[in-house]
Every structure is written in C-alpha cells, then in structure tokens.
Image (cartoon, helix red, strand yellow):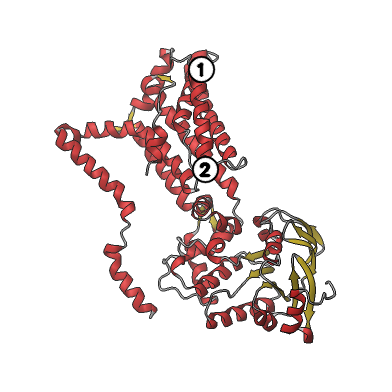
Amino acid sequence: MEVEDFSVPGFAQHASFQLGKGEILGFAGHVGAGRTELMERLVGLRPGRGVIRINGKPTLFPHVDASLKAGIAYLSEDRKGKGLLLAEDLRVNLTLASLDKFRRWFQIDRAKERVALQGAIGEFDIRAGRKDMLVGQLSGGNQQKLLLAKMMMTDPSIIIIDEPTRGIDIGTKEQIYKFIAVLAAQGRSIIVVSSEMQELIGICDRIMVMRSGRIVGAVTGEHMNENEVVVLATGVKSGEAA
Amino acid sequence: MTDLAADTRKVQKSWKDIDLRAVAPFVALALLLMLGAIANPNFMSIDNLLNVITRSAFIAIIAVGATFVISAGGLDLSVGSMVAFVASLMIMFMNSGVIADPATMLVVATALAIVIGAACSVANGLITTAGSIEPFIATLGTKGIYRSLTTWLSQGGAITLRSPDIHSLYRPAYFGALLRVPVPIIIIIVVTAAVGAFVLHRTRYGRHVLAVGSNEDVARYSGIPVERVRTITYVIQGLCVAVACLLYVPRLGSTSAAICANTPTVITQR
C-alpha cells in the first residue's frame, strides 16, 4: 500500500508513506501529532484529501464500509467508546463488522455466529466466564483481544492498530505482540500507532515519526532506538522526510 | 477462578437476572386488568377484551414503528399528525371518484396511503439525518406541518367517506373477523411478529439498528452506514403509520384535523 500526500484539515499535512506486504510499520510521535487522525482519514472516518494506492490502484475511501471491502481494518484506540458495544454480548460484537458473512437468506445465521465465536475465543485466547456475558464486564485485555478478533473477521490484508496495548496487563500485552507477529507472518501488512516507544522498537520493522501533523522522518535497522525517535518527535533535529 | 464465578452467576440467574424494566409493563398491564375487573365484572369477558385489543391495534402498530426509531436513537413526534394527514388524503382520494369501480378504487387508495406514509417519513428521516437537526425539533416541526395541512384540506371540519359502496367493501378491514379473531388483532400479530421481532432481532438490518442506538461511534467504526440505517427506521415508522391508517379509516369512515393529537405522547412515554 502506498499513501500519497494525505492531509486532514487541522491535524495532518502532506503525509506520504509506503507499507510493504508482511511489514509491521510503527507510527511514533507525541499525543496530538496527528497519527490517529491520519489513520482515521485513511479508512474514511474523517474528511481530508489524499490518495491511497493498493496494488497500484488509486482510491480514497468515503466511509469505513469501503475500506473494509478493500481489505483495510482499523482498530480504534478507544475500544470502550468506538470499538465495542459494551452492553452487548461477545457474539454480537464479534460479527458486527462482518455480518455479510453470516447471512442466510434474510436472516443472520446464529449457529454460524456461535461457531465463529468459539473459533475466535480459541484463536485469540479470549477469557470470558460465560459466552453470553456482556462485553463491558470483560477485562481490558480481553476486550482488546475481542476487538482484534472482530476486525479479523473481515479478513483484512492491511490492519491498522491504534494503541494496541493501552491499559492492559503485561501478560496480555505479550500475547498481543505475538498475534501481531503471526498476522504479519501470514503476509498481512500492519500499522501500529503507539505512544510506547519500547513497544514500537520491539515489534516494528520500521518506524515513522510524526510531529505537529507531519511525518518528520523514518527510522529503520540499527537507527531504531529511543534516542533517534525522540530526537525526531521533539524536532531537535529534522530528519530526512520519508 | 472463572469457573467459580460462572457457578455463582448461574445460581443467581433464577432471581436476580430478571430485568425489572422489562417486566414492569406487564405488571402494570396486569394491575390495570385487575382494576378493570373490580370496577365492572363484565370487563374480563372475552367480547370486551377483544374489543379493547381491537381498539388498541392502531396504537400497537404505530408503536412497532416507534420501536425501530427509538432503538436507533431517534424520536418521531409527528406520527399522530401523520395519521390525520394520510387518512385525510386517502378519504379525499376515495371521494374524488376518479376510479369508478369501488374495489379498484380501494386498492389504489390503499397503495396511495402507503406511499404517502412513506413519503412523510422519508422527509422526517432526511431532515434529522442528512439535515442533522435534532429529531425532537425536526419531528415537532413536521408534526405541525402535517396537522396544518390536514386542517387546510378539511377546511377546519371533517372529511367523510361519501361512497357507501366503498365503505361497505372496506368495513371488514376493521369489523371483520377470521375464525372469530377480529382482523385488527391479526394485523397486530403479523406486524409485531413479522416486522417487529423478525427484522429487529433476526436480520442484519435489525442488528445495525441496535448497534446504532447502542453506540453510534462503534457502529460507524464497524462500517455501518449510520445515517442510512436511521433514515430507514423513520420509513418503517411511516409504513406502520400507513397500516394503522388503513385500520382507522373504515372504523368511522371519517377524519378531521383533531384526531390522534396525543398519539406520539402515548407512544414515546416509556
């Protein structure tokens, strides 16, 4: 995927970057650098300009439905407010973004939904006391795993994860890193937006650094250390624009 | 740990899991029935109960539509005025005599009522979604508009179905019975079961409605076309209003600008 000259009024200007197949690309920067807003524009959640090329074909998504159909899934950083319906059970949440797959005539195939839930619970190690419990009663880590499972139901080739480990325990964090690595090994491309520098350095192949709505640099290989990233994020030194 | 938690919850399920808010309306209904039975022993007779249900059919059908609108986080205050407006246009059309054959006339008038109901509700839906005006304000406005149009159409008086042929043909829609069950009761069951329960709980669209009402942001982030889902709830409401009209007109064969003034309040008070 290539992203060319993306602008989100008030949040990001002229952002361009490339994402390879199976690559894990990190987005670092301070809170308010425009990372979330840029990603939300990519999947069609905000107004703004720019071009996305997937396999060379230029597009710009008008809404999330279009980006999901094109194989791009975005996991919001706000899992309680924008990711999951807290007052519904696991099954309803799991299939919400992929209900087309559970259609039988005019109905939703509940048996198929239950099978999918069983599969997701196993694959993503979601620990729920009861399958019909409300998602609001799950721990933060299990909610995050359910959100990942929900978006994976759409079978995306590009996954954008915003703050994947915010407010979850250390054991679940490690599990999430493992899931991300597995998804990348399957040939899916992944963008991780995070404010935790160590996390990005640990799991990413490459890190883009944003400051005040602009991509100010990229770090890879041996340059991928906290020092380089902080220097770019604070603007002490302006690196070569990617 | 999780097993233990699951076990305790299972034990509690019998009593504490009962949702009082879901049970409350039925308790209130039972109390009302008891009050009626005490006031007059004839109240609990089958004939009287059928009569009460038949007269409530009209409200029940509109309430099914309101369930969709409210579930998606909207509100429609204009339903009562919409009934008056649709019923007036329907009777005026049947009085116009453009179609001589009463049966054909009745079929066309029925179709017309449904189209007008849908058109009125599309207006409501688009004003609140595309126009992003609060549904309370928007439907309060359209309520006034539909009511005024009815007053104007009826010249401040009543509009009465003049053709006795059409009226006698149409009467069974309200007064008729199938296997001794009055037609309006059959229509309530069909509308509630088929439209209400099936669409809301079994279809993809119903799931979308509940998601939009539960959390609009989650719905949008999940790729659900929030505005379209909301607009369609208003259309369902309009179609329910039209069906209710079809039952209202044969009962008296007459309408005026004053009918159903309190309908939205009756329905939206939960």
Q: Which mark is residue B233?
A: 2
Quadrant position of the N terminus of chain A in the picture:
bottom right
In-image side of A159 versus B4 (left or right)? right
What residue is drawn where x is 38% and y is 17%? B168
Question: Please, is residue B176 above or below residue A219 in the view?
Answer: above
Q: Which mark is residue A17?
A: none
- Near mark 2 (Cα within 10 A), the count class, few <14, some 14-19 or many ≥20, is many
In-image side of B13 versus B138 (left or right)? left
| x, y percent for residue B37 | 17, 37
**Location of residue B195 (image quadrant):** top left
> Label 1's element?
helix
Q: Which mark is residue B153?
A: 1
In-image side of A91 versus A176 (left or right)? left
| x, y percent for residue B22 | 33, 52
Quadrant position of the C terminus of chain A in the picture:
bottom right
Q: Which marked residue is nearer to the observer: mark 1 or mark 2?
A: 1
Of B21 and B251, nearer the camera is B21
**Subunit ID for the residue under disc 2:** B
